Image: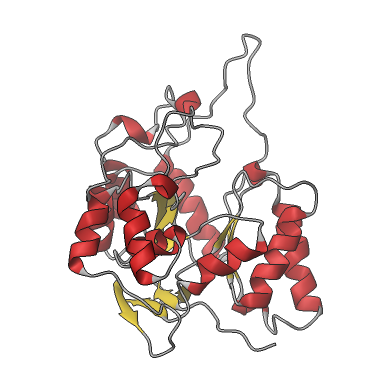
Amino acid sequence: MSVDIAHFAVLTKGTNYPVIGLGTHNVTGGPGSVRDAVKYAIDIGYRSVDCAYAYLNEKEVGDGIQAKLDDGTIKDKKEIFITTKDGDDLFPKDKNDQFMFENHDIVDTWKGMEELVDAGMAENIGLSNFNKTQIERILHSARIKPCNLQVEIHPYFSNRKLVDFCLSKGITVTAYAPLANPDSPLRMGKEPSIFDEPVLKDIAQKKGKTIAQVVLRFILQRNIIVIPKSVTPSRIKENFDVSRSCKIKMFKIEDMGVPVFRFSLSPDEMEQIWTLDKYPRIFIEKWASGHQEYPFHAEF
């Protein structure tokens, strides 16, 4: 089968990294659903999968990737990017049912990650849910600069100041929850849904696109990588269609000749979507708010 491979952002080491990946955080669908989603995503051209030890699905992600290596869809392991965040104990609690934290210095942890690169166990290393001050601490001490910051970004929560800071430092940015997680258990039922927003409905109708595609285009047009999650084949394909003729080169979106971004947003349409940027983040990780490195007490 002929597929279009997702186009790329250039990381700090010169590595080409897909501008769209398959997110797997809190996906639902039962045993095997993540494995099957990964297999389908790779079949249609995805070459980036985001996972984590804490998501309890690393084995399914690995099984899906291995299946595509075995059948020859992936010719070389270097074609596929796996983003993960490791751990060894899931949210331990004390006798009073309070979370127990380690208080390692983030700079020491970063130095340990640099050693993984030295040992050939990781190609690129980056950050997730760090604020500006924390990133500056890493940059001040780093021998290997972080290649990427992964944070919550969607039309309701743009994270604009932090994105601008990262891009000014040559750090690419990845948006998790780019569709504002309409099915997240963290939502209380009163929050708005991007799929009900008149401005997005209007733009989508004019473009002949879905609301999800308009939102992903909006984020990509900000020079941000996206990792929308789904186990539904039609949605996985719909999301991927937005990226096929797009690349981020030196942190600037460039549309390519292939007609599958197939649309762009005008400055006026971008401004219309910016008006939605007026809500707090969804993932406040309140359970960790007492930790010395909790990132969300700061403005950005």
Please, which residue is most extreme toward the top here?
96
On screen, residue 274 versus residue 25, left or right, reads: left
| x, y percent for residue 227 | 50, 59
On screen, residue 148 versus residue 79, left or right, reads: left
- How is the protein colored in the picture? secondary structure
Residue occupying the point 41% across, 55% down: 175
Quarter occupied by the C terminus: top left
Residue 165 seen by the camera: no
Q: Is residue 54 above or below residue 214?
A: above
Residue 68 seen by the camera: yes
Q: Quadrant of residue 184?
A: top right
Residue occupying the point 37% across, 37% down: 281
Residue occupying the point 77% across, 46% down: 30
| x, y percent for residue 259 | 43, 86
Q: Is residue 130 above or below residue 9?
A: above
On screen, residue 125 versus residue 80, left or right, reads: left
Quarter occupied by the N terminus: bottom right
Q: Quadrant of residue 278?
A: top left
Along the line of sight, which residue is nearer the eye, 122 or 285?
285
| x, y percent for residue 123 | 53, 69
Along the line of sight, which residue is nearer the eye, 90 or 221?
221
Q: How many numbered marks, from 0 up?
A: 0
Residue occupying the point 24% across, 36% down: 299
Q: Is residue 179 above or below residue 99?
A: below
| x, y percent for residue 154 | 37, 50
